[in-house]
Amino acid sequence: MISSTEMAVVDANAEALGVPRKQLMESSGNAVAHVVREVADPGTSVTLVCGRGNNGGDAFVAARFLSGYEVSVHLLGRPETITTDIARENWKALQLAGVDTRRVGDSRSLELGDPDVIVDAMLGTGVTGALREPEATAVEAVNAADATVVAVDVPSGVDADTGDSEGPAVEADRIITFHDGKPGLESVDASVTVADIGIPAAAERVVHRGDLLRLSRDPTAHKGDFGRVLVIGGGPYTGAPALAAQAALRAGADLAYVACPELVASGVQSYSENLIVRPQPGDRIAPPNVPDLLEAASGMDCVVFGPGLGDADASLEAAASFLAAFDGTAVVDADALQAVPEVDTEATLVCTPHQGELEAMGGTTAADPDERAALVADFAADLGVTLLVKGAVDVISDGDRTRVNRTGNPGMTVGGTGDVLAGVTGAMACPLRSIHAAALGAYLNGRAGDIVVEECGYGLVATDLLEAVPAACWHDSVN
């Protein structure tokens, strides 16, 4: 099963991996036509009721494959308002081929006639809520007809994720859906066919620009809606916690706080006026600081624990004590990773080790990429955490789902890029599930490095990545 959001991500990732959406639409339309042939003999009449998006585009393609039938295609709306180039191209192809195409400008003018089959291609998986006109009236007309109804992807008016409908919905006899089943179809009383349309398995496994679709923002949002991140670390180092906190802001968090020893607090603050610094007594994070840290963390959407922490026994004890008492979401990095294997916690943890740190935690590795990924998945399941294991190819797993990230370059071996990764992942963990936060954290950090290396070559430094993170987040192409 795949949700509507995941389907959109996979579709975009497939294109990024070299499978054009036009090709996928051609395969989808062919699959629709195949189901029509199963329910109706050649020469019978088929009416396709189409929306202006890619769902309608699938039906435009299907109409070309149904040359042996009496086909009529009804477009709900004006052709110039078809929303995608590929759907518009396929509409034009129908007209050039002399297929009976009809524009429905007013739902009251929709006349379906007496077809043997009606294809419902009005709305796709991404549409939720009550139907508007002209779709609402079109649905009533479809349901009133004495015809076999074939729905494309999901019956119009039905939520693909829940199966619910807020008002009228198409009563389909057959459903042809693509790539994988949709959760909402389990509750629909219709025969469902899942068609393989050529989306490669890598579109679900490899993190790519389609994953950026998870970062959509409500235009009516307010300050704080996209996350408050608290970075806990510093003492031996000042740059690491400052990098992580600035990276969280660059990746879209609304507020970034740094809890660090008072000895280095002014140094951390000096890196950016955008940081909110909360000095802690002492020269290192230690057990006496934990109550204050827990109180500070209680108002945060995510905590990033570890940048610049150091490996003093007192600091590692504080990390273990904090994680044992914390029940929120935390990204654990650097020396704090040592505390994770032995701690019993209710927290949701995302751990970001490199290979050496993974082995210090008790994990194992392998030269073969598939075996390495399997070992990471097993270890994530054993620990009950999400792992983001850094490398030439990053491996991300929560034990249930495993993904790989290919962005990044050898210039990112420079110090500090891991702190940027921790901060970006912390920002992602505010609105997203851990597996998605870790996957996007890896992709965006590597993508920022790739942007920078084009300008700086292998002389890049971690602060260069901060400037490139917004471009990686918001300006990569997602069609």
Image (tube, rainbow, N blue to C red):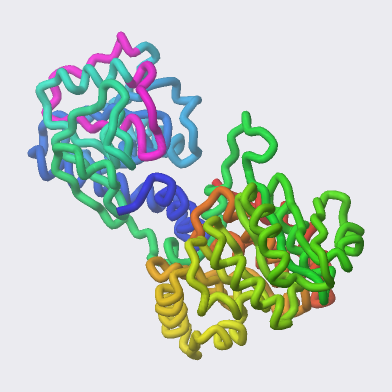
Which is more toward the observer, 150 or 408?
408
Residue under the image location 19 percent in, 36 percent down: 150
Q: How many marks?
A: 0
**Residue 400 in the image: above or below residue 216:** below
**Whole-percent x, y for residue 237 in the image:** 82, 74
What secondary structure characterizes most of the magenta part? loop
**Residue 431 in the image: above or below residue 71:** below
The magenta segment: 107-135
Residue under the image location 66 percent in, 72 percent down: 318
Whether 116 is among the magenta residues is yes
Residue ranking furthest to the front:
288
Whether 238 is among the magenta residues is no
**Residue 305 in the image: above or below residue 112:** below
- The reply, left or right, for residue 432 in relation to residue 120 is right
Is residue 460 visible in the rendered image? The answer is no
**Whole-percent x, y for residue 312 in the image:** 73, 82
**Residue 238 in the image: above or below residue 326:** below
Q: Which quarter of the rendering shows the N terminus?
A: bottom left
Is residue 19 visible in the rendered image? The answer is yes
- The reply, left or right, for residue 243 in relation to residue 402 is right
**Whole-percent x, y for residue 106 in the image:** 37, 11
The image quadrant that residue 266 belongs to is: bottom right
Residue under the image location 49 percent in, 25 percent down: 81
- The reply, left or right, for residue 112 in relation to residue 203 is left
**Whole-percent x, y for residue 339 in the image:** 59, 77
The image quadrant that residue 61 belongs to is: top left
Which is more toward the observer, 469 or 155?
469
Residue ranking furthest to the top:
108
Residue ranking furthest to the left:
41
Residue under the image location 29 percent in, 21 percent down: 167
